[in-house]
């Protein structure tokens, strides 16, 4: 069947989309989320903390110092900076919190697919921006947590995105 109904991975509503010749000829990817759910997945925009990626324009000026949020400044002052930094793609809102809980604690493995296009785009731009080829490493789960979940969510995301992981850590 050429045209079949597509359902939102999150809320299972029918995704209504218009098709044109270019969609058919170029195999345009099918949306994974309905417009309502897509709007709830908020991408961080604007200036970010150089360490934790917090959106700085949402903070009062007294909580920002030289491109860092005050939490990270305090973290550095207490000698707790163990990473080079992190890059966060989405705002951690109620929608994202619930989605992550569904994946991690309720085993809704299929929801991982909704993040794949975003992570793929980010990982590819990250790889292109580095002189040396970066390696991607997942933090391994404990045996107990692996048994509870049935999968490692980071490994599942990497598989969905097509990014190879290097297993160099052990529990």
Image (spheres, rainbow, N blue to C red):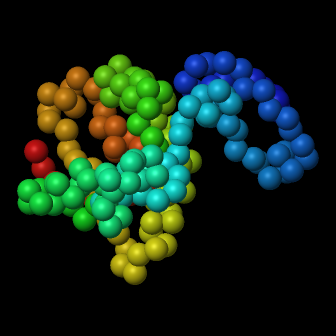
Q: Observer-nearest residue: 141 or 96?
A: 96
Q: Residue at x 61, y 19 (%)?
A: 12
Residue at the farthest bottom position? 131
As drawn, 58 above or below 18: below
As drawn, 52 above or below 152: below
Q: Observer-nearest residue: 76 or 145?
A: 76
Q: Where residue 41 sits in the image (x, y, percent)?
A: 54, 36
Image quadrant containing the N terminus: top right
Q: Residue at x 78, y 27 (%)?
A: 16
Q: Observer-nearest residue: 161 or 71?
A: 71
Q: How many marks?
A: 0
Task: Examine the image and state in which quarter residue 33 appears.
Answer: top right
Q: Judge from the rendering whether residue 29 lies leftward or rightward of residue 150; answer left or right.
A: right
Q: Judge from the rendering whether residue 64 lies leftward or rightward of residue 145; answer left or right.
A: right
Q: Residue at x 82, y 46 (%)?
A: 23
Q: Where residue 40 sits in the image (x, y, percent)?
A: 56, 31
As drawn, 50 above or below 69: below
Q: Where residue 147 sits in the image (x, y, percent)?
A: 21, 26
Task: Examine the image and state in which quarter residue 168 appears.
Answer: bottom left
Image quadrant containing the C terminus: top left
Residue 80 visible in rendering: yes
Q: Judge from the rendering whether residue 73 lies leftward or rightward of residue 90; answer left or right.
A: left
Residue at the farthest right position? 21
Residue 160 visible in rendering: no
As drawn, 25 above or below 96: below
Q: Residue at x 39, y 48 (%)?
A: 60
């Amino acid at each position: 069947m050429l045209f079949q109904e597509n359902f939102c991975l999150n809320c299972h509503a029918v995704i209504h989309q218009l098709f044109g010749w270019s969609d058919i000829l170029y195999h345009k990817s099918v949306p994974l989320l309905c417009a309502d759910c897509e709007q709830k997945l908020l991408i961080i925009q604007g200036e970010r903390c150089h360490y934790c990626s917090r959106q700085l324009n949402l903070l009062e000026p007294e909580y920002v110092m030289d491109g860092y949020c005050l939490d990270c400044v305090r973290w550095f002052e207490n000698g707790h900076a163990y990473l080079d930094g992190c890059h966060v793609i989405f705002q951690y809102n109620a929608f994202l919190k619930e989605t992550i809980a569904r994946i991690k604690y309720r085993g809704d493995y299929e929801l991982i697919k909704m993040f794949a296009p975003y992570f793929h785009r980010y990982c590819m731009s990250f790889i292109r921006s580095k002189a040396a080829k970066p390696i991607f490493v997942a933090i391994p789960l404990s045996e107990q947590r692996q048994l509870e979940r049935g999968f490692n969510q980071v490994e599942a995301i990497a598989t969905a995105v097509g990014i190879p992981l290097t297993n160099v850590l052990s529990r």
